[in-house]
Amino acid sequence: MRTSFDFSPFYRSSIGFDRMFDLLENASLNAENWPPYNIIKLGEDAYRIVIAVPGFAEDELTITHEANMLVVTGAKSEDEEVEYLHQGLAVRSFARRFELADHVLVEGAKLENGLLVINLRREIPEEMKPRQVTIRTEPTMPASKQIEGDKAA
C-alpha cells in the first residue's frame, strides 16, 4: 500500500512552489504522534503551541528557533538506580519540529503542570505590509482651439 503522494509531476509543471511541495512531503513523513500537542490561534497574529511533556524538567527540554523551523527536543536522563516493575509513562527522548511561516517569532516559553507552552507572534516588517497607493491625476491641458481663417478666400 502506498502511503505517500508523488509530487514530481507538479515539479515539472510549476515554478516557485518547491518549498510548498517539500512541506507537504515532510508532513507526510513526520507521522510521529509523541508527544501530543495543540496549536492554538489566539488572535490575528498570535499563536500558541502546547506540548504535553509530563515527567520532563526545564533543563531536559530544549527549544531552538531556526530559519522557519521551531525544534523542541526532550532528553530524559537515565536513572540507572531505578528498577521499574511497570513503566507506563512514556518519558522517552523526542524531537518535535514545527514549520513556521516567514516572520513568525518566538515570544517565550514556560513549563507549567507538565505542559510546555510556547507563544509565537507573526510580525510583518513595515516595508512588506500592504499600503495604499494614491492615484494622481495630471492637470488636463486646455483643448487647442482652431483659429478660423478668412472665409473670403
Image: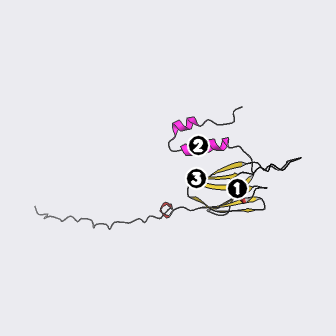
> Is the N terminus in the top left, top right, bottom left or bottom right quadrant?
top right
The majority secondary structure of the magenta stretch comes to helix
* x then y, percent, for residue 10: 56, 38
Which badge, 3 or 1, is on the more N-terminal residue? Answer: 1
Q: Secondary structure at mark 3?
A: loop
Q: Nearer the viewer, residue 147 or 94?
A: 94
What residue span does the magenta drawing correspond to?
5-29
- Residue assigned mark 3: 68
Instruction: Tell me the quarter of the picture where residue 61 sits.
Output: bottom right
Quarter occupied by residue 41: bottom right
- Around disc 1, counting alpha carbons within 10 Å, would you say few (fewer than 14), some (14 to 19), or many (20 or more)? some
11 in relation to 95, above or below: above
**Disc 1 on helix, strand or loop?**
strand
Disc 3 vs disc 1: which is toward the camera? 1
User: Disc 1 or disc 2, which is closer to the eye?
Assistant: 1
Amino acid type, callout 1 = Leu
Q: CA distance from mark 1 to mark 2?
A: 27 Å
Numbered circle sitting on residue 22: 2
Q: Give the mark count.
A: 3
